[in-house]
Amino acid sequence: MTPLRTSEPGALARSDGSPLLLVPDTVLLPDGPADGHAVVVDGAVFTAVGPAARLSRDFPHLAPERLPGTVLMPGFVDAHHHLTQSFGAALAFGEPSEIFRRVWAPLEGALDEESAYVAAKLASLEALRGGFTTVAEAGTRAPVDVEAVASAARDAGLRCVLGQICNDSDRGPGPGSTQEVSALAEKHLARYETDPLVHPSLAVSLPEAATERTLKATSRLAAEAGTVLQIHVNEHLAAVERSLLQHGLRPLEHLHRLGVLGPQLLAAHATLVTPGELTLLRDTGAAVSYNPVASAWKGNAVAPALAMAEQGIRFGLGSDGTRGDAFRLLDAAETAQRLTYGLAGGDSSCGGGWTWLDHGTRLGADAVGLGGTTGGHGVRTGVVAAGAAADFLLVDLTGPEMAPSHDLPWELVRRGNRDQITAVFTAGCLRLWHGWPPHWDGRSLVARAAELAREVVRRAPVVRAHRTSTAAAR
């Protein structure tokens, strides 16, 4: 068959929400690839998934849209992102750990409403181009209304679990600060309660960034709302040592003492964890974002994701804003485990291709609160199944990367790349076609972002430990 390489998306770009019967060569289901299957997309959800012949009989009024040479698969979930840091992504190269103090906080602090919106929309576009249909945004430090970030993700067509930062340690230990933060958190949760693409979340930058009273309060609010509380935990040696000096406990142990560990917690990084802390994560049902590229670029360690998977600890894969490329993230997730744990133990599988696909899609959705009927207003993503959100990719299988094909899950992890993504859908709507949005001008956004980024970086009090590679080479 001729592969799907047309220059126009045709009926796939319908704007009236009319139902689609999509018939690719393969559908990636929760239990593996299925040939000869099809899906029906009606509005924002999959209404039917099954053998193509049966769906054609069940929906005779729908003309099949045949997608030869294509796999229809769930969109990826980025379990940890910082959308308003896109203007400085390249400033992290070669920098040591804890650069948030020298780079990210100053950079975000220099953003105004327009630059925060453009930075977040630029990151959203990059995420969609890389196959992510959902990101968990860990909260911006930009001095603007968080709606600037929400609007950017919404306008780009990206599903976003949007964190509202609830830090208050600089206000003192009194109850007043907790009351103020709780009021802000409740307003944020109510503001996006019915938003189709933006799902409210709470966030604390680090355990030390909030008073104990506020940590308890925000954890309770997140649990009651069925959403997640995002906290950077046990990422760097310095943070672990500060917690030991202040509390006599490691950060995860400190949160456990306060009753914050639970299904509502999304612990970002968790790279430096003891066997006892792994047990705490398992027993409390807390989730982790495993961010292997961040470990490679600026980390002190790699999270023991294989051990987490073996113990049943919930986790998703996160980019930490390093690069919005889901296929490279899958590869990094498996490679980091192989280099740090697999080689030493003679493990030639390191979880197998399916492990990283699952944690990059449906299990990642569970980690960010969008995996079932509770939380996220009942939205379920990361899976191709009837009733789930129609967040999916059409990926070309006709190129040399996938031919000949013997084991599609492994091939997607090891050989897949974003150039093979033909189309990206969220909530049943076509958001990208061959890498660019069909309904708004992505190239103009990139040009405006380049202009604004130069201005923002120029005025931000960023402190780098290293010169650029070109300057260093000279």
Image (spheres, helix red, strand yellow):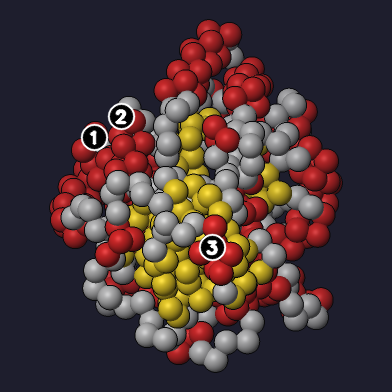
CB atoms of marks 2 and 3 within 8 Å: no
Disc with the residue nearer the chain's start (2 vs 3):
3
Disc with the residue nearer the chain's start (1 vs 2):
1
For label 1, the SS is loop
What residue do we see at 52% from left, 51% from top?
A: 46
Foreground: 250 or 257?
257
Q: CA distance from mark 2 to mark 3?
A: 52 Å
CB atoms of marks 3 and 1 within 8 Å: no
User: x%, y% of residue 193?
Assistant: 47, 26
What residue do we see at 42% from left, 23% from top?
A: 191
Q: In the rendered image of this protein, does residue 384 appear above or below residue 256?
A: below
Q: CA distance from mark 1 to mark 2?
A: 7 Å
What residue do we see at 39% from left, 35% from top?
A: 141
Mark 2 — residue?
Answer: 144
Q: Is residue 293 visible?
A: no
Foreground: 365 or 398?
398
User: x%, y% of residue 227?
Assistant: 59, 32
Mark 3 — residue?
Answer: 57
Foreground: 270 or 242?
270
Q: Quadrant of residue 84?
A: top left
- Viewer-side label of 3, 1: 3
The residue type indicated by label 3 comes to Arg
Disc with the residue nearer the chain's start (3 vs 1):
3
Quadrant for the C terminus in the image = bottom left
The label shown at residue 112 is: 1
